[in-house]
Image (cartoon, rainbow, N blue to C red):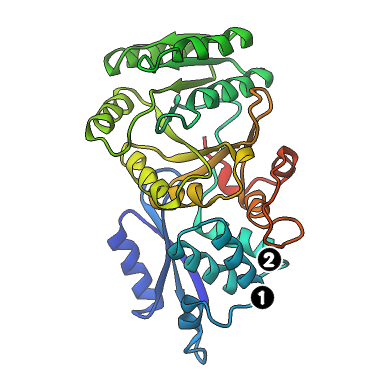
Amino acid sequence: MRLKSYTAATMAEAMNMVREELGENAIIVSTQRSSDGQGLRITAALEEPGSDDDIAKALAGEESAPFAEKVRESLAYHGVPPRLIKKMVMTARSLEVGSPTMACAAALENHFDFAPLPERKGIRPFMMVGPPGSGKTIAVAKLAARARLAGRPVGVITTDTIRAGAVEQLTAFTSILEVEISQVRGPDALPQAVDLMMQSYDLVFIDSPGLNPFSHQDMGYLKALTQAADVEPILVLAAGGDAGEAGDIGEAFSACGATRILGTRLDMTRRLGAILSAADAGQLMFSEVSLNPHVATGLCAINPVSMARMILPPDEDLQPAHFEENDLAEQPTSPRTEVS
């Protein structure tokens, strides 16, 4: 089976490239937005001559190779939607290498982009967005603490003037870190605050109110907020929820400009299907994950290998993995993570 990726400005152009090179029998394995936000990339597969039933068997889950079958079982345990399981198992089956974990990592690398947030300097502020209770305020505090401990000038803006105590909670963290915080009320005041912060700091993080992804009014407010200034929205989503709901949430926040997903509460969940579903449905890049409640040490970048190790435990059985910060920190960063 041949696998090949194509990058184009539109889906129509990409499909024409697939048909011209692979023909009408090619199957689209995955589609994803380019890491720079311009255009998209699709991966297509074509069965080799003499293996007429390979694609059908892969899609039906029949006669999978051992590594791919282990990947299938583990993804099902994590509650990953069946459609996404089929795509990932198909890739794992065609690229089977080393071990089930590495086969899973290859499938993740092929289907998702991994782009941790910069630790030195950002070209625009990063706004944490998401539903209520997803951990946006703590994520901002953790990102600010990471930058502060690395010796980088960092500023924080909060637009969350809705939730009672939200400003006070974030102020408590920023005062300990000796980080400047600016309070903004609504989209009209955001551009000036962003301009002032970007003149003084290498990294600026923005907290936003928790908003209902299924409310047109809430999403309209978020669009006004993200479009008021040159910011990059980052979806903050707690792991462990329903995968179907998470997919809808990912789509909703992606429509408001979100480009990446930051998963929280991985220390309190055993299944990652929700954040995988949200990233897939919203075409979001994975950035960081939160592994514990500690502000100074609870945030780690994620890459295909470290995520595969969370999906498939070290002994490669189907028992839930225990997530350790060192398990993620020691892994090499994917070349795709060089996004600022």
Horizontal side of residue 231 vs 340, given as left or right: left
Outermost residue on the bottom side: it is 50
- Of residue 133 and residue 34, the one placed in the foreground of this image is 133
- Of residue 213 and residue 257, the one placed in the foreground of this image is 213
Query: Compared to 109, does 229 lie above or below?
Result: above
Determine which residue is flagged by label 1: 66
Residue at x 50%, y 53% (from the top left corner): 112
Which amino acid type is shown beneath numbered disc 2? Pro
Horizontal side of residue 229 vs 66, given as left or right: left
Disc 1 to disc 2: CB gap under 8 Å: yes
Q: Residues within 10 Å of mark 2 (few under 14, many from 20)?
A: many
Q: Secondary structure at mark 2?
A: helix
Q: Secondary structure at mark 1?
A: helix
Q: How many marks?
A: 2
Indicate the position of residue 18 as horizontal and vertical percent values. 37, 70
Determine which residue is flagged by label 2: 100
Horizontal side of residue 295 vs 12, given as left or right: right
Indicate the position of residue 323 as horizontal and vertical percent values. 69, 43
Q: Is residue 198 visible?
A: no
Disc number for residue 51? none
Indicate the position of residue 114 as horizontal and vertical percent values. 55, 46
Indicate the position of residue 299 as horizontal and vertical percent values. 63, 32
Residue at x 34%, y 29% (from the top left corner): 211
Residue at x 64%, y 17% (from the top left corner): 148
Residue at x 75%, y 39% (from the top left corner): 326
- Of residue 332 and residue 64, the one placed in the foreground of this image is 64
Horizontal side of residue 247 vs 296, given as left or right: left
Query: Compared to 167, does 317 lie above or below?
Result: below
Q: Residues within 10 Å of mark 1 (few under 14, many from 20)?
A: few
Q: Earlier in the sequence, mark 1 or mark 2?
A: 1
Which amino acid type is shown beneath numbered disc 1? Pro
